[in-house]
Image (cartoon, rainbow, N blue to C red):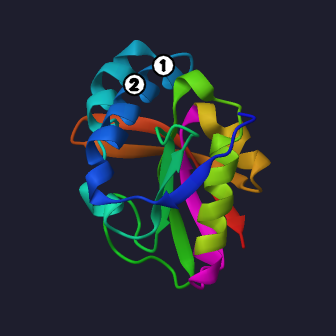
Amino acid sequence: MGKALTVRVARPSDLAEIDALLSRAYPVLLKPHYPPSVLVTAIPHISKAQPKLLASGTYFAVLDVTDRIVGAGGWTATQPGIGARSARATGHIRHVVTDPTVVRQGIGRALMDRVIDDASAAGMRRLNCFSTLMAVPFYVSCGFKEIGATTINLRPGIDFPAVLMRRTL
C-alpha cells in the first residue's frame, strides 16, 4: 500500500467491521473461481465473522493508515468445523480475507507473517489451511504446499470446494 499497516489482535468489538469486510470481499474475490451455484449457497455461510475467532487472541485485524480494517485472519489449535484439537503442534489457518479494493498491496502478507510468527511462538510446528481455489497461489507464496483437493461441508447439502495446504514452521 505504500502506507503503514498495523496488524493487531482482533477484538469482539471488531465484529461488525469484519463482518462487513467478509460480506463485500468474498462475493467479489471468489466469483471468477466458483460457479454461481456454489457461490449462491456458500457465500451466506462463509461471509459472516465468527465471534469465537474474534475473541480467541489468535485472530488478527489489519488496519490501514486510517484505522480501517482491510484484512483479517488467524489461526487456532482446533480444526475448523469440528472444534477438536488435531495432531499435537498443528495449527489451522482461519477465515482469512482482504478487502477486494486493495488486494496485492501487502495486506495478506503482513497478516500471514503475524499469523505464522504467532503460531510458531505458541509451539505450533505446522499449519494446515483449507484454501479457497483463488487463494492457492497466495498461500504457496507464503510457504504452504498443496496437499490436495478437498470439500468443506458447510451444512447438509452445501459443499464448498477447497484445497488442503500445509506449511512446516
Q: CA distance from mark 1 to mark 2?
A: 7 Å
Residue where numbered disc 1 is placed:
28
In which quadrant of the rendered view does residue 101 lie?
A: top right
The residue that appears at 67% across and 51% down in the rendered structure is 110
What is the x, y in percent for residue 35? 45, 16
What is the x, y in percent for residue 120? 64, 77
Above-or-below relation of 34 to 16? above
The residue that appears at 66% across and 40% down in the rendered structure is 136
Q: Quadrant of the C terminus?
A: bottom right
Does residue 166 appear left or right of residue 77 in this picture?
A: right
Mark whose residue sits in front, 1 or 2:
2
| Secondary structure found at label 2 | helix
Residue where numbered disc 2 is placed:
24
Does residue 154 appear left or right of residue 97 in this picture?
A: left
**Amino acid of disc 2:** Arg
- Seen from the viewer's position, the closer of residues 107 and 82 is 107
**Amino acid of disc 1:** Val
User: Cβ–Cβ below 8 Å for labels 1 and 2?
Assistant: yes
**What's the magenta region?**
119-133
Question: How would you rate the neighbour count of disc 2 (Cα within 10 Å): few for under 14, some for 14-19, many for 20 or more?
Answer: some
What is the x, y in percent for residue 56? 36, 69
| Secondary structure found at label 1 | helix
Above-or-below relation of 166 to 85? above
Q: Which mark is residue 149?
A: none
- Seen from the viewer's position, the closer of residues 112 and 6 is 6
